[in-house]
Image: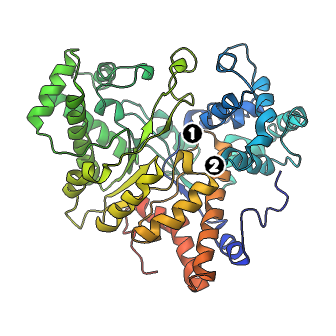
Amino acid sequence: MINDKNHFLLGSRTAARLYESIAELPVYDIHTHVNLGAILRNEPAVDPWTALCQGDHYVSSIIESLGAMSRIEWYDPRTTPERKWKAYADVFPLLIGNQVHDWMRMTLDELGIKMSFNAGNATKIWDQLLETFQDSRWSPANIFKNSHIRLMGTTDNPVDSLDAIKRSVEFFPKGYWIPAWRPDPFLILNPDPLAGKTWLDWIRDLEKTMGADLAGHWAEFCAALKARHDFFAELGCTVSDYGIRIPYGHEVSEKRAKSIFNKASGGQAVLPDEASDFQAFMMRFSLDLDFEKEWISQIHFGAVRNMRDIAEQYGGIDSGCDTTGGCAEVAISLRPLLNRFDRSPEKLQRILLYTLDKSDWTRIAGLSRIFPRVYSGMSWWYFDSVSGMLEFLETVPDMGAGFAKIGPFVTDARNIFSLKPRTDLFRRCLANVLASMVDMRQNGFSETAELASFLCSDLPRRWIGGKSATKPL
């Protein structure tokens, strides 16, 4: 429950004024994990847990960590959504100060819930939401229709048919939904065993998509990836995304990459140095394709995946067993790659670097200052919290090249009810930080408000539109 929405997270009168100036601006969200197919079916939510929490590892990992439910029970098919809801309610009052606590309160407030979420109110809130979800206002289509969202990006594998993107124009304006190119399975030769598929499995999938033999055929493999990249572009893609532990950017000859490719295609074990060399070459290959199309290239690095062995038996991949890592040598690692694209000023490609370790913020801030094409990606995952975003916004622009060298805010959301709370939380944090630029640093309110508007809406709109993101402020 939020007692006073007008002052929620707004620490001063100036912050409140700045927030008011950006609260209703259009939203352009280039990185989400929402299920577009389910949205297009436009079916009402079946129950509160499924609608608000299902598949959200932020929530499930905390419930387990605080002892409200064991992992064994969590993944038992006999465990009902209502049982999970009540487990969440049991620990929710203990989560004050955590990002999921803020998001959930904001979501429930938006849905008309005016009581605190706790064990005593869990059933009453459950019943009230069941009734609320029957109102057509909360159908998937109307959630978007009644929002300020103007563009949504999905996250897609090169072998995806993108049928949902194609069908989206039946319900949404053309260009409202765009795919994002996520080629990780074809870059990483030794994926985590929990991934379920090997690199060679993905090659077989690509063969089916292309109707051609690719394993052991280097030129054909590269041509197939380029063809899929072109296919994504035809359906409006202007964004790529690379999720990798370490962003290898060193130079590797094509002869070396081909040799490793042939070895892996034959099912032979690949050594760690071979895997890193292949990833470095394929990153460069894919970013070359991005560069020619002037796409936005997002590189997410630093996540340490699947820390808990128990996930192999219960939950599998993406079940809340990942943690922060980082890459102390990120600047040295990426130097050859970034220099490769430090040319052709007429091209508008941007490279966003997202890290899952605060110690890397200073490194990507420095890279964003010295490389015109490089931007610091917003604080992400463990750090899209209030404390994380405030610290990021107070630190990185100062160390880099100002707020204009921070990439657009992205929700990274998995369910559609969290889109508005996540965006709103960011805008409130931004208003607080920019208020200090007015009150403490003595900048003018009007020019600071213009900067806030630029960061929230104008910047991502111009990027997606393919126009220059620079603007006199």
Please tell me in which quadrant of the rendered image residue 450 appears.
bottom right
Mark number displayed over residue 34: 1
* x then y, percent, for residue 294: 30, 56
Q: Are marks 1 and 2 in contact (CB under 8 Å)?
A: yes
| Residue 148 showing in the rendered view | no
- Position of residue 4 relative to residue 12, above or below, is above
Going by the numbered disc 1, the residue's amino acid type is Val
Q: Residue at x 73, y 13 (%)?
A: 78
- SS class, disc 2: helix
Q: CA distance from mark 1 to mark 2?
A: 9 Å
- SS class, disc 1: loop
* x then y, percent, for residue 284: 23, 45
Q: Residues within 10 Å of mark 1 (few under 14, many from 20)?
A: some
Task: Answer with left or right where residue 254 lies relative to residue 471.
Answer: left
- Position of residue 368 relative to residue 172, above or below, is below
Q: Residue at x 82, y 55 (%)?
A: 2
Q: Residues within 10 Å of mark 2 (few under 14, many from 20)?
A: many
- Position of residue 404 relative to residue 197, above or below, is below
Q: Residue at x 83, y 38 (%)?
A: 129
Q: Earlier in the sequence, mark 1 or mark 2?
A: 1
* x then y, percent, for residue 40: 60, 37
Q: Which one is in front, 219 or 172?
A: 219
* x then y, percent, for residue 70: 69, 21
Mark number displayed over residue 419: 2
Please tell me in which quadrant of the rendered image residue 61 appears.
top right
- Position of residue 216 relative to residue 383, above or below, is above
Going by the numbered disc 2, the residue's amino acid type is Leu
| Residue 192 showing in the rendered view | yes
Number of marks drawn = 2
